[in-house]
Image (cartoon, rainbow, N blue to C red):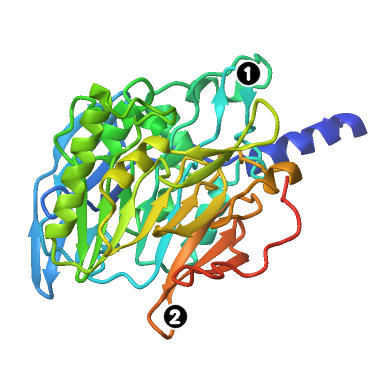
Amino acid sequence: MRLSKSSALVLLVFLAACAHKPSDKAENLTYVGLADSKNSFVRTVAPKDGKCPTVQFAKAPGEVDVLPMQEAKFDSTTVCEANLPEGTKTVIVGERQISIPESPKRIIIFGDTGCRLKGNYFQDCNNPNEWPFARIVKAIDKENADLIVHVGDYHYRETCNDPVKCAPFKDTLGYGYRAWEADFIAPATSLLQAKPFVFIRGNHEDCQRAHEGFSKLLTPLGENSCPQFQETRYTSFGNMLMVNFDNATLSDQKLDPKSPEMAVWRAHYRKMVNTINSRPETEVWLMVHRPIWGLAPNWNGPAAVLPVNLNMQTLTKEMPLPKKVKFVFAGHIHNTQISTGNHPVHVVMGEGGTALDYYDAATRRLIPAGFTVLPSNHGYMVLDKDAQGKWIGTVKGYEGQTNFVCSLEDPKMPCDAPVKSEVKK
């Protein structure tokens, strides 16, 4: 059969599109989520009628345990799960191994990774320039990190109104497994099966949105109902403690400090502070989704920067974070920010793939002292220690290129010279 030139061109374009369309399926994937000593977990995502694999837990050379995995159902898939035995150094599944670091030397921070489809807002999930999460994962694969921290908001494929644009994504909308698979599990597969994660709950995983998937896939065992907030998790690495504090459902709108709702959050926060004070570790990293000291641009009005989250700021004024809290890492705002002052170094790293928050020139002029808002560009942060033992944060783009090197423990100059303009793709 002979094709006309125009028909041949259409066919080539179609074949090229098919060749470059990322896979949105992930099956028989085993991964590790770190929490505290009793709640760290191993999970396998299997087909609906699939069998749970055999997982080995190595504590020392020649000392290997094999534990049964429990089966649970999430939509069209089987989720196999087991607690990670305390003292495990390596998780072994077939020929794959996931090492559990005793003291991580290289840590990746990223968040807000999903492809935003909601009503009339359309992010082209098949365009790797517009939704580059898979490219970011490929770059992180090469970093040889010891630990990955996701600061929340994995799921963004909620609804889509345009019948033409939305047609390719109609089977991956909503809060079922297919949406989770396409938005996070499949593109992140290479990282999930190679490195341990700390999973922070985002506001997209609250009780009105994608919490079921978060609970079945990314939380410690035993959470079958949707809580206002999870119990705080404390992951210890020798002298360093990572604290996973769930503030995903705490409103960005200022609440009455004397309200019953704030009383509940106050108790949640106070319990965390008291626990940190009682712990022996001397270096603490606090992980949240909603920033404590963040700035958002004003999307629906004149140029302005809006503080995020005033309710968290109220709590920290009432009861300051312990001095041994060195860093606070957050997401929620879709750019990279670093703030310093009368609080721990605060980093927002929300550029993992979803649509970015840009600051125009007028808005940038309103940024107060103590805040560094980097030009928006999708990417992630690599944490390494320098020769003096201080943590350096390298902000990298979706191809792994270095955009900024931030001396996080030097409040006078947290980052090197930024690029001159925002990067819009």
Of tags 1 and 2, the one toward the viewer is 2
Residue 392 appears left or right of 192: right
| Residue topped by disc 1 | 120
Q: Amino acid at mark 2?
A: Asp
Image quarter hosting the C terminus: top right
The residue furthest right is 5
Q: Residue 262 versus residue 337: which sits nearer the camera?
A: 262
Instruction: Identify whether 63 is placed above or below 366.
Output: below
Dot 2 crowding, Cα within 10 Å, few <14, some 14–19, many 20+: few
Marks 1/2: CA distance?
A: 46 Å
- The residue lying furthest to the bottom in this view is 387
Horizontal side of residue 61 vs 29, given as left or right? left
> Could you say where residue 116 lies in the image, as x and y percent from the top left?
55, 31
Q: Secondary structure at mark 2?
A: loop
| Residue 364, disc | none
Q: Nearer the viewer, residue 10 or 363?
A: 363
State the residue at coordinates (14%, 35%): 222
- The N terminus sits in image quarter: top right
Report which residue position mark 2 lands on.
Answer: 386
Task: Give the residue type at disc 1.
Answer: Asn
Q: Nearer the viewer, residue 62 or 295?
A: 295
Image position of 87 (left or right of 333): left
Q: Measuring 8% from the left and 60% from the top, which residue is drawn there? A: 65
In percent of width and height, residue 393 lies at 49, 67
- Examine the image and state in which quarter residue 184 appears: top left
Which residue does the image show at 10% across and 65% down from the upper left?
64
Estimate the x, y position of residue 11 in percent, counting from the top left: 78, 33
